[in-house]
Amino acid sequence: MFGQIAAANALSDIYAMGGRPLVALNIIGFPYGKMPTEIMYQILLGGHQKVTEAGAVIAGGHSIKDAELKYGLAVTGLVKIDEIKTNAGARIGDGVILTKPLGTGIISTAMKNNIADKELIDLVVRQMAALNKHAADVARKYRCSAVTDVTGYGLVGHALEMAEASNVSIRLTTAEVPIIRGAIDLAEKGQLTGGGKDNIKFCESKVSYARKVRDSMIHVLHDPQTSGGLLIAVHPDDAPSLSRDLLGCDTASTIIGEIAPGPAGIVFE
């Protein structure tokens, strides 16, 4: 599963730009002598499985002896020039859709501290291993003006990048943001990440919250996501249809806000 999740995360950048992955190179650092080599085999097998599911191939890779286990992939994809999606094209009036619920960082922290139940662990592992391929294929049929994947900077950080690149304000309805069950409770119990706390500090000058937004919710909104979903700005007439079609992809497919005029920033209502 480690290999599958790492591969799904690496492939997401291609999907976020409207492309299709072609080839990937494995990159692995492995603590020889501290872990059985069977573990490395299983990690590489998981990566192979996800790259194959994406319709791409692994063309080789690099490995080094390292004190800490690391695995990722360098992925090359293909997209027509006039179909490239970036985070810089969001237009005023567009709807904003998020395709995976938040909370993987907080829940992963709880897993490390042995306070997450098996059902929750299975749920979050399946979500992180899920490709954004199907969501990207559906989104390609609609008038999407800007797309990015939500990863280490959390929902707020990646939305802020889109707002600044597009010179717009993004207004999000807090109650509509999809969250993995239990993430709020775990945040309230202190199962927070260092990265999430850094994200809050980095973004605070350009983000505002309605009074009703609790501190635990703010931590979830900034939670670093491993292999998170796509954040999509789409023509307002297309947003409901895109959201419905995404339901068939086993995604969150939730309209969480809209693109608005104003200084580049994020407003949570």
Image (cartoon, rainbow, N blue to C red):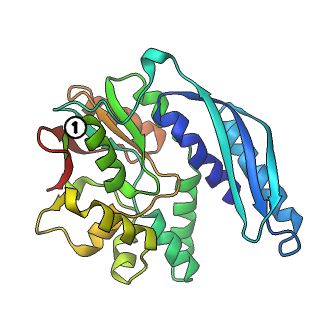
Q: Is residue 248 left or right of residue 20?
A: left
State whether residue 203 appears in this view.
yes
87 lies left or right of 237: right
Q: Tell me which residue sits at (43%, 25%) in the image.
A: 140
Q: Is residue 132 above or below residue 83?
A: below
Find residue 38 and report its image quarter: bottom right
In the rendered image, residue 242, in percent from the top left (x then y), is placed at 33, 31
Q: Quadrant of residue 175?
A: bottom left
Which percent across, then down, holds residue 24? Answer: 70, 37
As rendered, which of 228 and 248 lies closer to the eye? 228
* Residue at image coords 32%, 69%: 219
Q: Nearer the viewer, residue 247 or 97?
A: 97
Q: How many marks?
A: 1
In this picture, residue 130 sits left or right of residue 258: right
Regarding residue 1, the answer to whether it shows in the image is no
Quadrant of the drawing holding the N terminus: bottom right
Q: Residue 206, relative to residue 181: is it above or below?
A: above
Residue shown at 52%/54% (left/top)? 127
Percent position (x, y) of residue 204?
Answer: 24, 63
Callout 1 environment at 10 Å: few (<14), some (14 to 19), or many (20+)?
A: many
Q: Label 1 amino acid? A: Asn
Give the percent coordinates (x, y) of residue 99.
Answer: 40, 45
Question: Which corner quadrant holds the C terminus?
Answer: bottom left
- Disc 1 is placed on an element classified as loop
218 or 188, nearer to the observer: 218
| Residue at the (34%, 32%) spot, across then down | 146
Look at mark 1 in the image and give the residue it sits on. Answer: 167
Along the line of sight, the residue nearer the viewer: 198 or 112: 198
